[in-house]
Amino acid sequence: MNESRKYKTKKQVSEPTLKRLPGYLYFLEQQKEEGVLNISAPTIGKKLSCDPTQVVKDLSVTGIKGKPRVGYNTYELIHALEEFLGFNRINEAFLVGAGNLGSALMAYQEHQELGLKIIAAFDTDEVKIGKSVGGIHILDYNKLFTLSGRLNVKIGILTTPNNVAQDVAEDMVNCGVRAIWNFTSANLDLPEDVIVQTTSMSSYAAVLLRRLNDSDK
Amino acid sequence: MNESRKYKTKKQVSEPTLKRLPGYLYFLEQQKEEGVLNISAPTIGKKLSCDPTQVVKDLSVTGIKGKPRVGYNTYELIHALEEFLGFNRINEAFLVGAGNLGSALMAYQEHQELGLKIIAAFDTDEVKIGKSVGGIHILDYNKLFTLSGRLNVKIGILTTPNNVAQDVAEDMVNCGVRAIWNFTSANLDLPEDVIVQTTSMSSYAAVLLRRLNDSDK
DNA sequence: TCAAATTAAAGAAAAAATTCTTTAATAACT
DNA sequence: AGTTATTAAAGAATTTTTTCTTTAATTTGA
Ligand SMILES: NC(=O)c1ccc[n+]([C@@H]2O[C@H](COP(=O)([O-])OP(=O)(O)OC[C@H]3O[C@@H](n4cnc5c(N)ncnc54)[C@H](O)[C@@H]3O)[C@@H](O)[C@H]2O)c1
Ligand SMILES: NC(=O)c1ccc[n+]([C@@H]2O[C@H](COP(=O)([O-])OP(=O)(O)OC[C@H]3O[C@@H](n4cnc5c(N)ncnc54)[C@H](O)[C@@H]3O)[C@@H](O)[C@H]2O)c1
């Protein structure tokens, strides 16, 4: 198919760009629903309040070309974005810590749109083990090692209390997990090749509170 | 140089810096627990795997000075960070949409560490109205306007389904909300002076999945 | 058919953020 | 007391990211 894909010569797409891509995708899907067949970068930029040239640069990572005076083909662009982000594949994950946040994530239906499929959850709480949330079984954390041998899961979602996060993360890595989506506040110390994406709520709170304070002086 | 300006013209702290600050705070609190009285930027940088000069620059926003060969006073730095971020004040908020994610946020105890206090939740679901989660009452969404008159709440947490997010956000603004913590995928179109912090889970998923794909060639 | 307007693409410039370098301070050690 | 090693601070350089500018394509409308 694509010859250049074999070589890792293509530079990594920057994190700011990657983070914006799902926003475009969500908007484009809305537009598609409304029957919009073509859409231009200025239109997207206007709605998402960002620079149109930024939109063009961001979308160029998909390889899709737009036509002058017409814009991009909505359908084609959606597909290319999903392909690029891996949202149209099934990316299996397991979740450890089926508490408040963990349960919310398990019940979250839109994960499917991200191609993310939580195939099992693990917990140490006797009360939770055996139950299900959002159709996902909560299993005994002790079974993590035995089960992960069969399943070939690359993604781990970490929603335990902070104080056990490091230990659980290490267990995950020993079970073959290559990427961890970390919702705890812990600063995970893991081998360099493990991909860690920390979603720190407090970072958002910090920006929000500070900006609010900045505004009223 | 104009000396007569009494207005706080201090430049806004950059978003990357703001987002890192809670990480330092969390780490410093851990260190304080362990009895560490002084800590140096290189030590912090090593543990959080970031550049020591970056640490110094980031922490300088608090106004706290470190001593050469000793580092920063742990206690003093923690206090200054909390003060700067507004974490030691009580920042009242209300939450709209007491569903899966909303309930998790309501039950989240660590919010107190962020000085964030959800004083009430609102929902349209008859079944949920009247119940409580984490000690927070779920009220009828229709009462939002009447209640917000008395309460002087500046922060709104938005965890409704995506399709009603814009309407709810507008209602919030009309009720005096100045800053919205948005957990939905909606691209909120609001007056410019309203602070919107969107915590988009899909952005993190995008980075995680893409990096995972990049790594296995 | 041809001019006008809109647009993507490519590259340049600007802005922002990070990393590197130098300097001065100071505590610990000799 | 003097020396050395460590460190924060300040500023320079680099890198990254965003915004601006130009160009070429192409559809629409005259
Ligand atoms: N609840 C939220 O809205 C929220 C928001 C932001 C961040 N977080 C973070 O997410 C994490 C979880 O928060 P929560 O509110 O869901 O807590 P929680 O206590 O409700 O859930 C933690 C779960 O982990 C389980 N657990 C404990 N030790 C375990 C272990 N060793 N192995 C496996 N499972 C174990 C517990 O039994 C529990 O079910 C925390 O780090 C918190 O800071 C939560
Ligand atoms: N659940 C998750 O883990 C998760 C993760 C990321 C993002 N999100 C986002 O958070 C939002 C909520 O997700 P969820 O899983 O909690 O959904 P949910 O359906 O469980 O909760 C939504 C709640 O909002 C209420 N609601 C509906 N219309 C309302 C209105 N007009 N006014 C007030 N309340 C109203 C519903 O009654 C319900 O209780 C969605 O935008 C979703 O994309 C959720």
Image: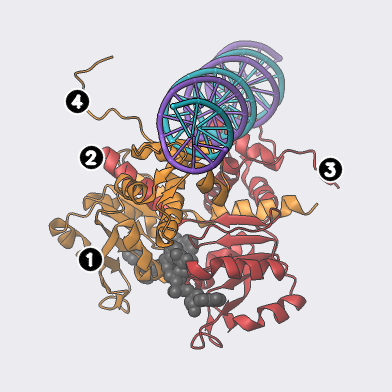
Chain colours: A red, B orange, C purple, D cyan
Which quadrant does the N terminus of chain B fall into? top left
What residue lies at 52% left-to-right and 36% top-to-bottom?
B53
Measured along the vertical axis of the image, is residue B171 above or below residue C28?
below
Locate residue A201 relative to residue A136 in the image: left or right: left
Q: Which mark is residue B142?
A: 1
Find the distance from the CA under tag 4 to the CA under tag 3: 58 Å
Is A191 displayed left or right of A27 in the figure? right
Q: Nearer the viewer, mark 4 or mark 1?
A: 4
Counting from the top left corner in percent of width and height, residue B61 is at: 37, 37
**Depth check: B80 or C3 in front?**
B80
Asked if A134 appears above or below D7 in the picture, the reply is below
Report the residue at 40% width, 36% height from top: B60
Kindly identify which residue carries mark 4: B6
Residue underneath mark 2: A216
Report, in whole angstroms, how far the alpha carbon at label 4 lies from the one at label 1.
43 Å
User: Helix, strand, or loop for circle 4?
Assistant: loop
Tell me the residue that label 3 is attached to. Answer: A7
Q: Is residue A44 visible?
A: no
Which residue appears at 66% of the width and 83% of the height?
A143
What amino acid type should be assigned to the residue bearing mark 3?
Answer: Tyr
Marks 3 and 1 in Cβ contact (< 8 Å): no
